[in-house]
Image (cartoon, rainbow, N blue to C red):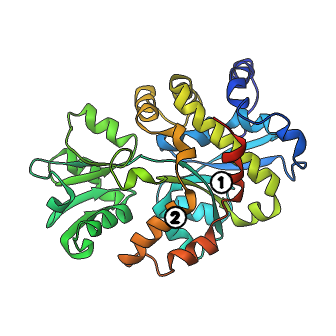
Amino acid sequence: MPMTLSRRRVLSAIGLAGAGALAAPGVLAAEARLETTTVRFAKIPLICFAPQYVCEDLLRMEGFTDIRYVDTKPGGVFVQDLAEGKYHFTSNVTAQNVVLVDSGLPITLVAGIHAGCYELFGSDGTRNVRDLKGKRVGTIAATDLLEMMAALVGLDPKKDLTIINDPEAKPLDQFIQGKLDAYMALPPEPQLLRARGFRDVIVRTATDRPWSQYFCCTLAARRDYVGRNPVATKRVIRAMLKAAELCASEPERAARRLVDGGFVDSYEYALQTLNDNPYAHWRDYDAEDTVRFYALRQHEVGVIKKSPQRIIADGTDFRCFDELKRELKA
């Protein structure tokens, strides 16, 4: 989906000058020339991936001229498209990124984006994770996270939980109809459930430890793009971090851009998601420690075979991210 400049987009770019000012003076001038001015992102209908959808003008400020969003879908198609190189970067849930690295896909995790996202809703009589023993739990994109939560409180996720995660089974609809005992929701699902009157949240990863102490979503990149284009990679990361700041400081503007760009349908759900998740706190978390935390939990429950140390060595490169933490001062 190639993007073209219009009067509205030019004015919007001017309005983003404040976000652009986050860069240290002279940074662009001091850096080497871009190896490429082309970058492609996944376009997937998940509101929490907002920074990659509102960063286009910031990317232009970084020197990119060919910026595209490639349509894809959650689940296997999304993963396969990344593996095949249909796009260069995408946000993704850290636990899923760890699984992709473990499976040997040619990706590199290059930055943390934000904490939060997931909320585990319960029905009557299901008040905590231990209450899930013997229960039916639904999700579309958080099976690994559910299993980690269960194992953390002493449950055997393979034996004690029945997880309904087939999109064809419509687990969200089943939960709404009272056929499931709990549901792990990812935006816009929490907003939809609240609109339907569901208020019992067992776990909210944006605020509940230990999940709130780590990046929920990390930025994954094609390994070959990172290797060939280190300067471009750093500038993409910088634009993403500025976009995260924009999501936190001007959520109304960011939500409107999500809708106007065709990334989400509901302005209200987008705005609520941006207000509920800590997009401005990317300086507060350690990306490598995040990968280590999730990889350790996943290794314990048998989701991955590689050790946390091997996952970090094979599938991460946070050097640019750590440099930008120092450069982009509060």
Q: Is residue 168 visible?
A: yes
Measured in 3D between alpha carbons, the distance from the residue under mark 2 to the one under mark 1, in whole angstroms, is 18 Å
Residue at left offset 69%, top offset 40% = 328
Which residue is situated farthest in the bottom direction here? 305
* Residue nearest the viewer, comparing 18 with 225: 18
Mark 2 or 1: in front is 2
Horizontal relation, residue 306 to residue 37: left or right: left
Q: Is residue 76 visible?
A: no
Q: Is residue 204 above or below residue 276?
A: below
**10 Å crowding of disc 1: few (<14), some (14-19), many (20+):** many
Q: Which residue is mark 2?
A: 291
* Residue nearest the viewer, comparing 123 with 297: 297
* Residue nearest the viewer, comparing 62 with 187: 62
SS for tag 2?
helix
Image quadrant holding the N terminus, namely top right
Residue 71 at x, y percent in the picture: 59, 48
Decide: marks 2, 1 in contact (CB < 8 A)? no
Residue at left offset 39%, top offset 45% = 206
Residue 168 at x, y percent in the picture: 33, 58
Q: Which residue is mark 1?
A: 89
Q: Is residue 61 above or below residue 252?
A: below
Horizontal relation, residue 115 to residue 168: left or right: right
Image quadrant holding the C terminus, namely top right
